[in-house]
Image: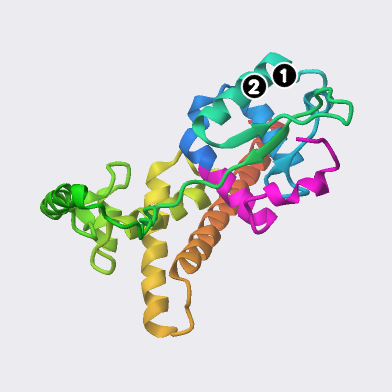
Amino acid sequence: MKSGKIESFEQFSQFHSLQDFNNHMELWLLEHKQHFSKGELMGLKRLVRYAAKIPGVCNAKIGTILKSIHEECHDNGISRSTFKRMILKAKELGILSVFETERKNGSQTSNLYQFNRFPSNEPPKEEILDHPIEASNLLKTEKNEKIKERIEEPSKLDHTYVSDHVPQPFVQLVKYFYNDVKTIEEYWKMAKITAYRNLWENDHDVILDVAIDSFKQLIRGLKFNQNIKNPFAYFYGISENKFCNLMHARLHDEYELNNSEIVFRQVGI
């Protein structure tokens, strides 16, 4: 692949917008953050920043990326080997694909990094093949169809199939309105994303409380507002606002506490 300006690789982008790219990266980090060391995460996040002009595509040189990290961290950046380990892990996990590029004279230059979309919960659509069936395979085909009929799973799984990582109080609430495993897990995933965006990802009790309250507000909205076309987006907005308010309250409490400590010191308490 020939090297060039980043604009020439626009067709490699899998994202509709920068926000779409950021949302998918948050999902990747929620799922696989624990697989990276602190230094590797630093390199990955910086690579994501360099992939903002064309969402999800970057052809910056490793040296350029490492230099920017060193400058921002006051010479406490990461090594080239750490960055390369991060790339290998990200490739193995499916987060990104890497393509080699070359100059006009054939010499190798910087790689092209293509970030991938986070896998959807939707199952892949089966391809409909319209090939003629040979007579010799007819009996085998009929036998396979009968076996498929016997082992075919229900087209829709209920709440009893929800993953163990989704708290049961949330499952028990949502099942009364959407008794479908994919829907329940999708709403929980939205709550986890908004918690992560507002630095609450480690407080599981708070996440559960906000998720339950947000879902109740969603149902209320659906009952009284017929203009809600995307319940998932509506739920996301509610939970985002709740976590944001909680963060402001936390910062306010910390500010008040710090001021109190200063006053105590001044009066000699």
Would residue 198 be visible to someone looking at this image?
Answer: no
Residue 125 image position (x, y, % from top left): 38, 57
Which residue, given by chain and number where applicable, does mark 2 sit on?
A: 39
- Residue located at (72% from left, 29% from top): 100
Q: Is residue 172 above or below residue 140?
A: below
**Going by the image, does 215 lie left or right of 85?**
left
Element assignment for label 1: loop
- Residue located at (49% from left, 28% from top): 34
- Residue located at (55% from left, 25% from top): 89
Residue situated in front as seen by the camera: 181 or 262 = 181
Please report whichever mark, 2 or 1, sits nearer to the chain's N-terminal start: 2
Q: Are marks 2 and 1 in contact (CB under 8 Å)?
A: yes
Q: Which residues are magenta?
A: 1-27
Q: Which residue extends farthest front?
A: 135
Which residue, given by chain and number where applicable, does mark 1 sit on?
A: 78
Which of the 4 quarters of the picture holds residue 264? Answer: top right
Please tell me how crowded label 2 is: few (under 14), some (14-19), or many (20+) other residues with Cα within 10 Å.
some
Q: Is residue 35 above or below residue 182?
A: above
Would residue 140 be visible to someone looking at this image?
Answer: yes
Q: Amino acid at mark 2?
A: Gly
Please tell me how crowded label 1 is: few (under 14), some (14-19), or many (20+) other residues with Cα within 10 Å.
some
**Going by the image, does 69 lie left or right of 209?**
right
Which of the 4 quarters of the picture holds residue 59? Answer: top right
Residue situated in front as seen by the camera: 129 or 225 = 129
Residue 223 image position (x, y, % from top left): 36, 81
Residue 30 image position (x, y, % from top left): 49, 40
Q: CA distance from mark 2 to mark 1?
A: 6 Å
Residue 143 badge: none
